[in-house]
Amino acid sequence: MAVLEELRITGLGVIDDTTLPLTGGMNVITGETGAGKTMVVTGLGLLFGGRADAGRVRAQPGRAVVEGRLRLVGRVADTVHARITEAGGEPDEDGSVLLSRTVTVEGRSRAHVGGRSMPVSMLGEVGEQAVAVHGQSDQLRLLRPAEQRAALDRFAGPEHEKLLDALREAYTGWRRVVDDLADRRRNARERNQEADLLRLGLDEITRVDPQPGEDDELKTEAQRLEHAEGLRTAAQIAQQCVAGGAEATDETPDAAALLGTARRTLEAQAGTDPALGDLASRLEEAATLVTDVSAELSAYLATLDADPARLQHVYERRAALRALTRKYADDVDGVIAWADRARTRLSDLDTSDDLLDELEREGQRLAVEVADLAGRVSASRQEAALRFADQVTVELAGLAMPHARIEVAVLPRPAGRSEPTLSVNGVEVGVTSDGGDEVELRLLAHPGAPSLPLQRGASGGELSRVMLAIEVVFAGSGGPPTLVFDEVDAGVGGQAAVEIGRRLARLARSHQVLVVTHLPQVAAFADRHLVVAKDTGGAVTTSGVRVVEDTERARELARMLAGLPDSDLGIAHAEELLAVAAKERRL
């Protein structure tokens, strides 16, 4: 479950600075035309990753800020909290998450989630889990065939989604193989020319057989061979200075002998002062280190040899490596990497008959798999279409459309368009990653009426009710826990308006519902009623949105009913409407 507890909007459209305290259940937002109701929905869209329109940002202060506190519990909380934490944010201890979106007049946009700066896409991810916004533009989207298919797929459930994912994966693999095969055949000459050049380079590199880091190793070896005599002299002098035992037998004592003498001298007085004993121990450690260095110098001298033949070989090897680095890369490791890339590229350029035959067989196998999955997806859609149509039809009966019926037609997509064609269930159809179906929502407005697509068979008011009915059905099968409706009751009045209010109130039992409406019949069902109002200067201020209750709420409904908030008759009518709605909510 998710509840948007508070929404603050600053500098957006006619809104200067206002805060909306929201509650679980049904929140209704009303107000005069132009007061800023639509900006509330715009702000919600921004807060949950919607596209920013710099033209809606007020010139002063030059930026729009939308902030919200989203309290999450249950499965949604686990999913959202895990994603936010992974991205570096931190939910509050009570499970709530602070969200923020800033848009400047220049069009720059910033987002914060859980106290950390995030990409705007993170707000979108949270919004997908928590909030669904439905307005008149959403009704227009629902008229598109692709949106109708997507709506049916969402309704069909998780098993259908798994089947659809398998189809998309198989389709992607099939198209990759088919496109690869076509490209190899179409560009065989160019591929062969490129392959010949790569083989020449690989042959040259293979003959030299460079090893990782070899150029640096040869450079070091060349320096040692070139300066062998100087190195030997330096090592010998150093070795003579440090070599020797504890007893000095030469007039010029070595380092080891001097250290031995110093150690023994201190040890002789250690009984008098223990501090000299500690120093003697340290001298013993130094003597051991000097002895080790002496041994290593001896070993170094044994390996140091002026070898003209070896030096010549090193020169020749470095010249061969330089020839490669001039052509293929800056160093030997780069040449080796070039060779690895060339071998990979050669496999991509292969146009041999064996490979082409193998690709063709793989393409045919995947085509059979795609066709089988497309047929299973189609069958799943047809089953879901019957359930979806029945449930929406039942909801329409409760929305003052008792004789209307929804049909969901799942039809094979005609072949011969831009999509590839496959035989699915014995029918040649155009296939995409979503299968071979076209989905169309149809409305039978009354008995005897023809079955027409929604865009032709539904009036504005009917389309609003169909949209609401669909949302109610979606809510019963999962989906985001917070639902926002922006004047989906447009073109509706009378008894139908009361039924819309009743349905929204029912939806609010299991969801948080935010409704922007101009209908008093809908507003009467609210658990919390917010009014957006202009001040005397014509701009919405910090006091522009307020919660109305009791008599003040009746006055607002009276204004919506007759435009007369002080009319005794209007207020009486409003109170009667509130009483009816309260009774309905208790049922």
Image (cartoon, helix red, strand yellow):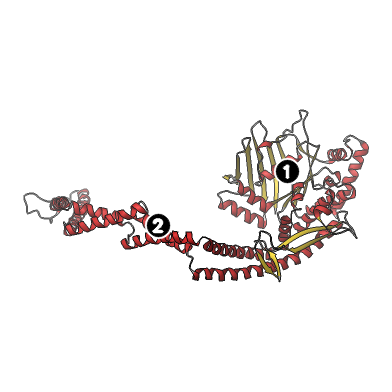
Q: From the viewer's perspective, is residue 6 above or below residue 537?
A: below
Residue beneath disc 2: 338
Which x, y percent locates residue 28? 79, 45
Q: Residue at x 59, y 53 (%)?
A: 83
The quarter holding residue 560 reads: top right
Q: Nearer the viewer, residue 544 or 36?
A: 36
What amino acid type is highlighted by mark number 1? Answer: Val
* Mark 1, secondary structure of its residue: helix
Point out which mark residue 412 bears.
Answer: none
Residue 323 in the figure: left or right of residue 445: left
Quick one: label 1, few (<14), some, or many (20+) residues within 10 Å? Answer: many
Residue in the image at 71% along x and 59% along y = 154
The residue mark sitting in front, 1 or 2, is: 2
Residue 281 in sight here: no
Quarter of the image with the C terminus in it:
bottom right
Q: Quickly name the residue at label 1.
A: 41
The answer to whether 495 appears left or right of 223 in the picture is right
**Vertical order, 567 against 232 (above or below):** above
